[in-house]
Image (cartoon, helix red, strand yellow):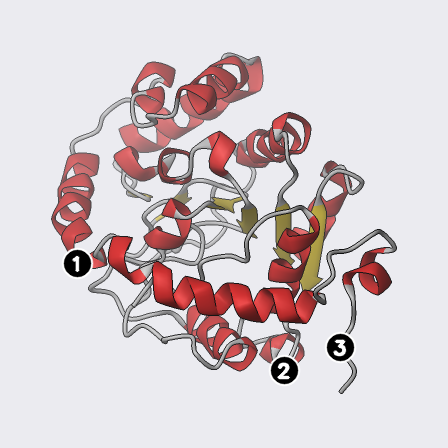
Amino acid sequence: MKQTTLSALFGKTAPVLTATENSTKGIKRTLASTQSNVISPAKKQTKLATNFEQSKRMTNYTIDSLLETVQDQKWKRLLAVEMNKDYFKKLLATLNSEISKKKEIFPPFPLILHAFDKTKFDEISVVLLGQDPYHNDNQAHGLCFSVPMNINPPPSLKNIYTELKANYPDFKTPNHGFLENWANKGMFMLNASLTVEAHKANSHATFGWQIFTDNVIKMISKESKNGVVFLLWGNFAHKKEALIDAKKHRIVKSAHPSPLSVRFFKGCKCFKKVDDALVTLGKEPFHWNCLA
């Protein structure tokens, strides 16, 4: 099969290597180089368990307490401005009202902004968008599509692994669904709604989170200096394309990996497309193989 060059794909001057060559070599470098500095997912579980227990004792969410869960100073500065807007104060009031009614909220409080804490703003290379957190017990921990180490990978995540393996046969499929090392490597894993009531999907979709996360997408589009790749799965995520400066950034779209649409997701080659897009931005292919 004839390889497609970056010039043909994007209409711009490309490196001498084709996109496919660049991506393939990059993923092989990744396989060889990332294993030595991978953070063991197993070491994270005690902290996650502590966070779940702390959440049960939370009685009031505040802007200050949320910001304390984020270490990156640039994120803190940007989020502080956004959180002091009237709509966000109303959002917090709604959440606190839910807490006062003894409703259980996922993810646990210390992990609501986990995506912002695990991926520093200036280190974002890929943005992955989800819809809302998992709503079953002990699943949501603030990173879209990810679950704690001791939880079986949900069906969508299994389909993600299958497509990754099809894109890169050397990908080592994990026996868990804990994706935090992707976040550590520069993937900002954002749900459109950052909280959900236990066992009620999309229950917080009207609280104001989507105003917040839409503005976060705009922040990244505006403030990111070197361009990032936005990976948009499914019609819900596709609508976010309007928030992104496509001249500055790259957008990769495909069907959602849900079992309901997996027949369209299968074979979409979205992971290779992400790597090809990163190459056009002068960046290395993504470190997909840092989970095992």
Q: Is residue 46 left or right of residue 200?
A: left
Q: Residue at x 47, y 15 (%)?
A: 77
Q: Residue at x 66, y 70 (%)?
A: 20
Residue type, label 2:
Arg
How many residues crowd around disc 3 within 10 Å: few (fewer than 14), some, or many (20 or more)? Answer: few
Q: Would you name the residue on which mark 2 appears?
A: 263
Mark sitting earlier along the chain (1/2): 1
Image location (x, y in percent) of residue 2: 79, 82
How far apart marks 2 and 3 lie (CA) works out to 25 Å
Q: Would you name the residue on which mark 3 appears?
A: 3
Q: Is residue 101 left or right of residue 165?
A: left
Does any portion of residue 114 appear in the rendered image?
Answer: yes
Residue type, label 3:
Gln
Residue type, label 1:
Ala
Residue 202 or residue 222, whichever sits in front: 222
How many residues crowd around disc 1 within 10 Å: few (fewer than 14), some, or many (20 or more)? Answer: few
Mark sitting earlier along the chain (2/3): 3
Image location (x, y in percent) of residue 180: 34, 52
Q: Is residue 102 left or right of residue 121?
A: left
How far apart marks 1 and 2 lie (CA) works out to 33 Å
Image location (x, y in percent) of residue 83: 49, 18
Q: Would you name the residue on which mark 1 appears?
A: 42
Mark sitting earlier along the chain (3/1): 3
Q: Residue at x 48, y 82 (%)?
A: 169
Is label 2 or label 3 in front? 3
Residue 49 or residue 253, whichever sits in front: 253
